[in-house]
Image (cartoon, rainbow, N blue to C red):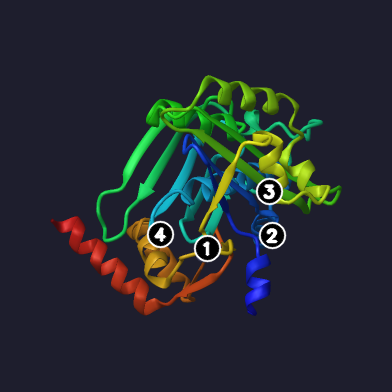
Amino acid sequence: MSESSNQNAPRVHKFLSEDLTVRIAVVNATSVVDEMRSIQNAYPIPTVAVGRSMVAALLMASHLKEGQELSLYFQGNGPLGRVFAEANYEGHVRGYCNNSHIQLPIEGDLSIGAAIGIGLLTVTHHLPNQQEPHRGTVIIRTGEVGDDIAFYLHQSHQIPSVVSLGVQLNEYGLVQAAGGILIELMPGHSEDMITLIEENVKKAPSVSKRLMEGASVEDIVRDFMGETPLMELEHPFPIKYHCRCSMERVLRSVMLLGIDEIDRALADEKPLDVACEFCGRHYEVGAEELTKLRNDLYKISLN
Ligand SMILES: [Zn+2]
């Protein structure tokens, strides 16, 4: 990739107000959300729910450190089942929900709160080198994702924030625009700043509509921040739909099926076909591996 195309590749842009009391992350994530939709052949409501979660994960992960990642896990009682998204500091992101082929009535504004339902949101911050991850859990506030992230930031980190996420689909269910902005008020922020942002939130058009109009991420920041002096922070990582699945992880998940299921697969006398739910990659687990897993499980059961 040439340097110029690299510079134009979508990435999470980060800004800081000159008085250091407001930090902002903003992204045009249309490409990665549509890639998820295409790989999983996700239907409209699942695409919006997972897409918003992917955008939120990208924005939040941009504030981590190198090599760190963050995941959002909505365990609601709605028809989508569990909704999961994961992103790292370097802009890699993936997501899925249990029921990506569910047909749900589309309301005017694609409200997804009911599709996610009532339950818990867990935010996990993974540190490198196998240290214990940090986990924070809050109730799902509305299931619209943006509200839930703002609630989490306030409950778990005492950070007042504005989270605006948007995924716009066309009549065929393809992603026309997806993106979002995360504005966090840091200690020392002024009342004037709160007033300014609150006023702008009321009149700001949705992020996805702005992206469809061709607005840049800087334009979107200005919708919310007006003329506030800002500086852009270095964060030169093009976003990318990226899955970390591997045969090793697949074997671990096959092991979770238990001895009876593995015996059934062995009796079939053909390799077990396992598809990754994030990226659709297929893995064939042959008789040799299945037998080894079975023996391992048998040994564990004896202990
Ligand atoms: Zn995968």
User: Looking at the image, which residue is at 32% across and 54% down?
Assistant: 127
> Does dot 3 land on a helix, a strand or a loop?
helix
Q: Report the amino acid beneath label 3.
A: Glu
Q: Amino acid at mark 1?
A: Cys
The residue carrying mark 2 is 31
Residue 275 seen anywhere in this rendered image of the structure: no
The alpha-carbon separation of the residues under discs 2 and 4 comes to 38 Å
For marks 1 and 3, the one nearer the N-term is 3
Decide: is 189 above or below 276. Answer: above
Circle on res. 218: 3
| Closest to the observer, 195 or 163 | 195
Which residue bears the numbered disc 1? 276
| 3D distance between C-alphas at marks 2 and 3 | 18 Å
Residue 261's label in the rendered image is 4
| Residue 299 in which image quadrant | bottom left
Calculate the distance from the C-alpha at mark 4 to the C-alpha at mark 3: 53 Å
